[in-house]
Image: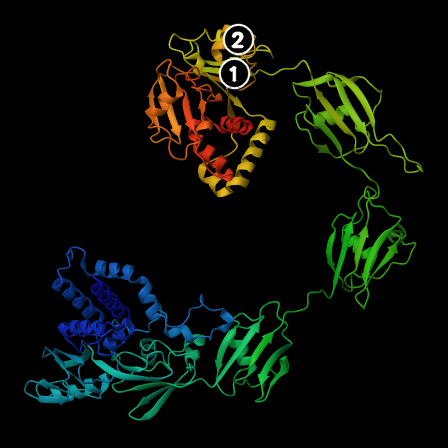
Amino acid sequence: MKMQKLFSILLFCLMLGSGSLMAQSMSDSQVLEYVKDGIRQGKEQKQLASELARKGVTKEQAMRVKQLYEQQNNVNTSKSTGTDINESRLREETKENTSDMLEDHPTTQDLARGDQVFGRNIFNTRNLTFEPSVNLATPSNYRLGPGDEVIIDIWGASQNTIRQQISPEGTINISKIGPVNLSGMTVSAANDYLKAALNKIYNGLNNTTDPTSDIRLTLGNIRTIQINVMGEVVQPGTYALSSFSTVFHALYRAGGVSDIGSLRNVQLVRNGKNIATIDVYEFIMKGNTQDDIRLQEGDVVIVPAYDVLVKISGKVKRPMRFEMKKGESLSTLITYAGGFDADAYTRSLRVVRQNGEEYEVNTVKDMDYSIYKMRNGDVVTAEAILNRFTNKLEIRGAVYRPGIYQLSGKLNTIRELVNEAQGLTGDAFLNRAVLYRQREDLTSEVVPVDIRSIMDGTSPNLALMKNDILYIPSIHDLEDRGNVTVHGEVAHPDSYPYADNMTLEDLIIQAGGLREAASTVRIDVSRRIKNPRSTADNDTIGQMYSFSLKDGFVIDGQPGFILQPYDQVYVRRSPGYQAQQNVAIEGEILFGGNYAMTSREERLSDLVNKAGGPTSYAYLRGAKLTRVANASEKKRMSDVVRLMQRQLGEAMIDSLGIRVEDTFTVGIDLEKALSNPKGNADLVLREGDVISVPKNNNTVTINGAVMVPNTVSYIQGKDVDYYLNQAGGYSDNAKKSKKFIVYMNGQVTKVKGSGKKQIEPGCEIIVPSKAKKKANIGNILGYATSFSSLGMMIASIANLIKK
């Protein structure tokens, strides 16, 4: 299975990396044996894929070989799925492997953009293969060669179709004519040559005035050529490509240029002569494909090392490294970088250059960008513009349109600025405004302004400077007009803005009116002591006023009482108002359900009587009371949980699910409460209480440090030792003297003597285990499943600690 997986991964790499137009040079069985031998020799998948690609293994052949391998190893393949589904499955299985193999260079997500070389990843991405299209019409300038299949259509007076492959000698054999040499001819030239040759057996082909027949030469299957890719590429070597392939496709098949390879000076050598120099940037920047020359048999693509590599950073649209040609200028680099960002300082650029001995800094002005020549290793930085304004004015305060305005020839004085802001508001304080001004040394000063006289024209209109800020206060800004606050039984208790002549009635209406529970005979107003001219301490820290209301109006209290800033109003709750309070009873009771309390002193017996009393199956000794925890009880439970966390650790507490609950169980004796109403056992109820009356439970549970925890039948008169024997007796680590009993009603008691009188139906006998002091609470938590709530557990812990 391991070999099958490696073989599948290898074949999938070939499918992604091979063109679909290459003629195979190895048989399917030879490819299969080649892969098996390579795996046995320990060759890496990348190496095998590269070797097979150079030998002309195509995608189609790779799929055939894969199926052959599966058949030889009895691999079940479903004929109904087809090649596409198998390929999809392979792609899913080998996703990570193929991505590593096809992308040898880090991607844009792997490196910071500024450290990449622009255009270098164009030949190692799976989305841009430069693979030639097979759907193109036969190019007239395409040169025929051995392996090309030519199709010669003859129509007119004579009709025929000749389909032959050009032999290795460069000829095709035409009946009645013999060998015809087409190798090296273009399609156009071969078409004319064949027309003259075939005229010997097909009349009228060369009649230019009135041809009776005509021919057309097109390509069928095209040949595979071998080319060499050398120099600074990822995988230099010999590759079998389609004869339609171009230089760009050859670079892609070689994995792209290496870290020192050039994109600007790619050489195409044919028959020992350099016939073209390809600049990949011309394609990337301008879409120019003229340099993407079609390859021929034996061509050599050479990628030399780069000459000039520079870096540009800062406020340009494409900050990264760029390869430059010798003699290219800084302006060309800016073009490659996409131009400046909107906030770039464009009047000069900083260039850090190596002069052969040390670094130097050159500041290049914008007029010199086109003549400043770039050198290898240059680092160019475009700075941002200054964070300041050349013509900003600002006006704040009591104007209709405060904000930022432009300092200009038409707006350069205080009067013009106020008018531009739509004038002064009615509450503007006109005697004095403040002008904040920044001096030339960047310090600030405050200039007082008589805004009234300037607007009236009786004082000189003060000229403004850039970055001036004019503040015109409101009369309300100069006095302390604090809020008034209402508390208690109103619809919306909150703080409200103070207004002149605001009364108590106004504030209550603004707060939504009185609630149903509000007292109309006691509404208090607290007022702070204010004496700005006082020179001595005062023992009084506040004044209190009380009022009565009727129909929302004050009927008793200081007449004409007007609220002042920072007054606080307290609407008291009426002592005669009581909302309904509900309790519930469930289980073996005649009329279980919710009941409303009618007295603050309502007790257990009262609720049972309201519910019609217990049924004949009720076990009153096992009844329990569940109570909703109030704030103080929750705080007490939180303190216990924090104690446990300190001794056991938060992780253990979390794993046990120990938390502060909203309810807890109160141990009760309902049997005594019913037999002696109003007695000590007859507890007073409170809102939310739930009484649960169980059925008779004729069992006893033994738990804790015993040999086998067990549940057995209750037998009246049997002592604790009898039940412990039913659980196999004590375990080795049992703490015999600390055993205790948990009753159904939630009560906990320590076993005294034989415990014969303490055993009741439904109870649980728990034997703690011996442990270090730190683990005592852990032992108790181990028995937490015996308790009905955290509240009961807390109570049990408290009882054990006391003992």
Residue type, label 2: Asp
Residue beneath disc 1: 583
Residue beneath disc 2: 606
Looking at the image, is 745 positioned above or below residue 239? above
Q: Is residue 518 left or right of residue 697?
A: right
Q: Secondary structure at mark 1?
A: strand
Quadrant location of residue 132? bottom left
- Quadrant of the image containing the N terminus: bottom left
Taking depth in this image into account, of 578 and 274 the one nearest to the observer is 578
Q: Residues under labels 2 and 1: Cα distance?
A: 11 Å
Crowdedness of circle 1 by 10 Å Cα count: few (<14), some, many (20+)? some
Residue type, label 1: Val
Q: Which mark is in front, 2 or 1? A: 2
Q: Is residue 768 left or right of residue 66?
A: right
Mark 2 touching mark 1, by CB under 8 A?
Answer: no
Taking depth in this image into account, of 598 and 447 the one nearest to the observer is 598
Residue 141 can be seen in this image: no
Residue 614 image point, x, y percent: 43, 9
Crowdedness of circle 2 by 10 Å Cα count: few (<14), some, many (20+)? some
Residue 497 image point, x, y percent: 75, 35
Which residue is depicted at the point 82% across and 48% down? 473
Which residue is depicted at the point 47% across and 41% down? 652
Residue 611 image point, x, y percent: 47, 9
Taking depth in this image into account, of 746 and 104 the one nearest to the observer is 746
Of label 2 and label 1, which has the lower sequence position? Answer: 1
Q: Which mark is residue 458?
A: none
Residue 648 can be seen in this image: yes
